[in-house]
Image: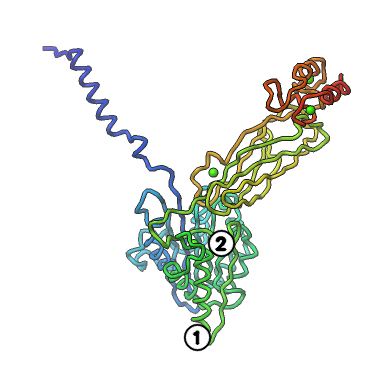
Amino acid sequence: MKRTISRTTLILILLFVSAQASKLMPTRGALPTQVRSFRFLGIEYEAGYHARLDDAQHLIRELLVYPNWNNSTDQYVSYIRFLSMYNYSEVADDVKAFWCGDLNFSNIKNQIVNFLCEASPGEIVVFFYGGHDFFIDWFLIQMELIDWFNSEALQQAYVTVILDTCGAGCFINFLPDHIVLASSGIETTYCGIFPFGLITGFELADDSNNDGWISAAEVFSYAKNYTEAIVSEGGGYQSPKSHYGKVEGDLPLVPRDMSKPFPTWDVAITRVTANPFNVKPDSSMTIIVSIENQGEKLATCKLYLYANTSLISLEQTTSSSGKTVNVTLTWFPIDAYGLYTLSCSVSICPGELNISNNNLTDGTVYVSIPGDVDGNGKVQIEDIVAIAEAYGSFSSHPKYDAKLDVDCNEFIEVKDLLTAALNYGQHYP
Ligand SMILES: [Ca+2]
Ligand SMILES: [Ca+2]
Ligand SMILES: [Ca+2]
Ligand SMILES: [Ca+2]
C-alpha cells in the first residue's frame, strides 16, 4: 500500500527540522567577539662546546601561566611553536605539543616565513633564539633572517625579538622597527642567564607604568639587572642591550594583574580635508588628516593617503591618549587631471580591536583649472552660472558648496566668479 504524508505532517516535519537546524547554527552572541592574538616562535640550539640549551621550553612553560598565552579564555588566542636541537622524545612532556621539528635551515625558514610572518596586523609576536652564535651568524651573513623580519607582514605586527647569543646586540641595527632584547652587546654571552632573567622578570618586574601588564621594556629592565649581577658575581662581564622600536618598548607581554584587560589602543581617522578643492595640475595640494587617539596608550602609526586607488602620501604619526593630531600632507598631482576621491587609512596598533575607524573616505577633489567647478576639464559658462547661483553664500548656508568656492575661503563671492571668468575657455591640454 502506498503511504502518503499529509500536508499537516509535512509542515510539522519541516518545522521540526528547521528548529533542530537553528540549534546547530551559532547565534551571533555566542560567537567569540574579536580577540587579541599572540604568537611565539622559539629556537633553541647548543650553547657552544656542545652544552645543551632548553630555554625555549622554559619560556613557553612560563608564558603558559598567563591567560593571553594559554588559550584559557575567549579574549585571547595564542599560537606557540618551537624548534629545538632536542628531538621529540627528548623534549619535556608539558611542551611537546609545541615542538615543530628538528633544527635545520629549511625548518627554520619555514617556521619564520610560514608561521611567524602569518601574524595579523596588530598581533603581538615574540621570537626567541638561544644558542651558539655561529648559527645565527650564518643567517646574518645570508641576510635572510633580516629580510624575513623586515618583511611587510611582520611590519604590521608588533614584534619582540629576544636573542641570547654572543654579540646579540649587533642585531639591533638591523631591526629598527622591532623591539630587540639582546642578552649582550658585542661581548660573549653566558648562555641561559638572560632568558632566566626574563622568566623571573615576568613574575617580579616592576609594572612601572601601572597598567597591570608587564611590557617588553619592563621585563627587560629586570632581566638586564639580573644578568649583570649574576655574571659579575662570577667575575665576568655581560650587559644586555635593548632597542624599543615603534612602540617605545611599551608592548604588553604578560599580565601582572590577571584580571586586567589588555590596554586599549584605538586610533581613528576623523576627517580628511583638502584645500584647495580646485588645484592646478602643476601646483601642490594640501590635505589635512585628523587622527584621534581614542585609546589609553601612546600610538605611533603609519598614515596612508590615497587618491582613488593610488597611494599619494605616507607619513608616520604619533598621538597621545585623548588627543587629535592634524597631519598635513602634500600632493603634487602632476598631469593628474580629473576628479579624485581621497581616502586614508592608519595602521593598526598593538591588539587594536576597533579597526573600522582606521579607514575613512572623505572628500572629493578636482584637479583642474581654477573655475572648472564641475570638473569636466573646461571652464565654461555652466561653471560661472553655478558659482553665480550660490553667490553670497557661506560655509553654513544651504546654497554653499565647497566645490564652488574656488579660493576656499568659505565664502562664495566676487573673487570666485572673477577667477572663473579669467580662466574662461581654458581646458585640459
Ligand atoms: Ca606595565
Ligand atoms: Ca581604531
Ligand atoms: Ca567645467
Ligand atoms: Ca571664495
| Ligand 4, image quadrant it occupies | top right
Left or right: where does residue 274 sit relative to residue 7?
A: right
Quarter of the picture holding the N terminus: top left
Pick the front one: 160 or 191: 160
Q: How are the residues colored? A: rainbow
Count of marks overlaid on the render: 2
Q: CA distance from mark 1 to mark 2?
A: 28 Å
Left or right: where does residue 52 sit relative to residue 348?
A: left
Q: Which residue is mark 2?
A: 249
**Residue 196, percent from left and from top:** 45, 73
Q: Which residue is mark 1?
A: 233
* Residue beneath the point at 32% across and 65% down: 93
**Residue 106, percent from left and from top:** 51, 58
Q: Please, is residue 386 above or below residue 353 in the view?
A: above
What residue type is disc 2 on? Gly
- Marks 1 and 2, the one that precedes in the sequence: 1
Quarter of the picture holding the C terminus: top right
Q: For the view shown, which residue lies furthest in the left direction?
A: 1
What residue type is disc 1 on? Glu
Front of the two marks 1 and 2: 2
**Residue 168, percent from left and from top:** 58, 70
